[in-house]
Image: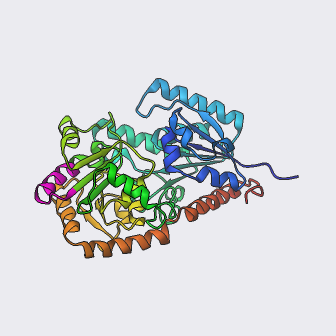
Amino acid sequence: MSAEKIKLFRITTVPISMRLLITGQPTFMHNSGFEVHLASAEGDDWNYIDDLENFHIHYIDFARQISLKKDWVALFKLIRLFRKSRPQIVHTHTPKAGLLGMLAAKICGVPVRIHTLAGMPLMTASGIKRSILSFTEKLTFSCSTETWPNSKRLLQYILQHKMIAPEKAHIILSGSSNGISLEKFSKNTIPNEAVKRVSEDCHLKNTDFVFLAVGRMVNDKGIAELVESFIEIHAERTNAKLILLGPFEAADALSDGVVSKIKSHPAIIHVEWSNEVECFMAASNCFVHASHREGFPNVVLQAGAMGLPVVCSDIPGNIDIIESDSEGFVYPVKNKEQLKSAMLFVMENNAVAAGKAAVLQQKIINCFDRRAVQQAIKERYIHLLTQKNIDVSSIH
């Protein structure tokens, strides 16, 4: 008689996080013998998750912001779900899913409770909001069996601030929640026609120098400084172009003035979203990540794997990837003049920029292959289950 399958719940606040943060992991775990359950809010992004028919799907209406009524309803739904399903592992991502998922799993006695920590809003908050966020993060960590910060400096931060007991914190390999697909993010595998289509859609010319930023169009991503820096650069170098790939959002919204500049400037191209980020990277000359806070930014890994020179702010997450001057261009966060200088340097010093990009590319190939990260996650699951004397013979 074969052993009963291990029930694994993966939970995110919204399905776009399920789709993008752990791409391929549910399938990997299913193929390894787990019974995989996915829980998140309803939304169109469910339609873009591969192999959905192999998983048990549960809709939980999480509120991304504080909403006591919705939060209580979601918590009780999770408790009811766990009591009925009796999972051996609950693994959460994103702050709200982490808080409610870990709390419900603890109440229900789930033996292995894991929260992946990917960025902390409290790092840029202040006052009462910071106090509330600090309390909720500590509560999440206290309810987990282990918390997995996805970068070394994020681990350092929660330990220095005594937010978690050291033995409950663990990093998978060199960091990252999921690694990246080295097959997808490679110039060798992207059809020339796809890159040409992006160039034509964005009205790019062979003589243009293209900067690219990918992410939500909000203040926290440093978009305001990036736009101001680029406008000044374009006044000096008219062949410069800036592609902004990502949606405008109401929370932490950009000012009307910044939005107006994005929409009206002839050399700024805004693209709401694309499932072919790699094609935009292949059509660009430099990747800029001006974010004010991060966990471990996949977009920097992706750009680095594509061989793009990277300009980024000196925040945790970014500098867990760009760790030395030989790997990229790091400037003080929110410093518009330093950002502008770094971008101009890349434009004017192609050989130096290409050399740093090559060093970073090799590092990413060596350390952040998605297949290795997913294998390490599975092995950690097995380790934690074994510690609880749970039969893991169904996992292969």
The answer to whether 324 is drawn above or below residue 169 in the figure is below
Does the image show residue 149?
yes
State which quadrant residue 84 falls in: top right
Name the residue rendered at 45%, 45% in the picture: 138
Please, is residue 394 above or below residue 219 in the view? below
Q: Nearer the viewer, residue 146 or 24?
A: 24
Q: Quadrant of residue 393?
A: bottom right
In terms of image quadrants, where is residue 327? bottom left
Q: Is residue 283 magenta?
A: no
Q: Whole-percent x and y of residue 375?
A: 61, 62
Q: Is residue 102 above or below residue 207?
A: above
Residue 128 vs residue 88, the one in the foreground: 88
Please state which of residues 135 and 206 is positioned toward the viewer in this rendering.
206
Query: On the picture, is 233 further left or further right than 312?
Result: left
Residue for point 50% across, 32% down? 62
User: What is the quadrant of the C terminus in the image?
Assistant: bottom right
Magenta part of the chain: 225-240
- Residue 128 image point, x, y percent: 31, 36
Left or right: 314, with 45 as reference point:
left
Residue 222: x %, y % from top left: 26, 49
Q: Is residue 393 above or below residue 110?
A: below
Q: Position of residue 363 (x, y in %)?
A: 43, 72
Please say whether residue 236 is one of the residues in the magenta stretch: yes
Tell me if I can see residue 155 in this picture. no
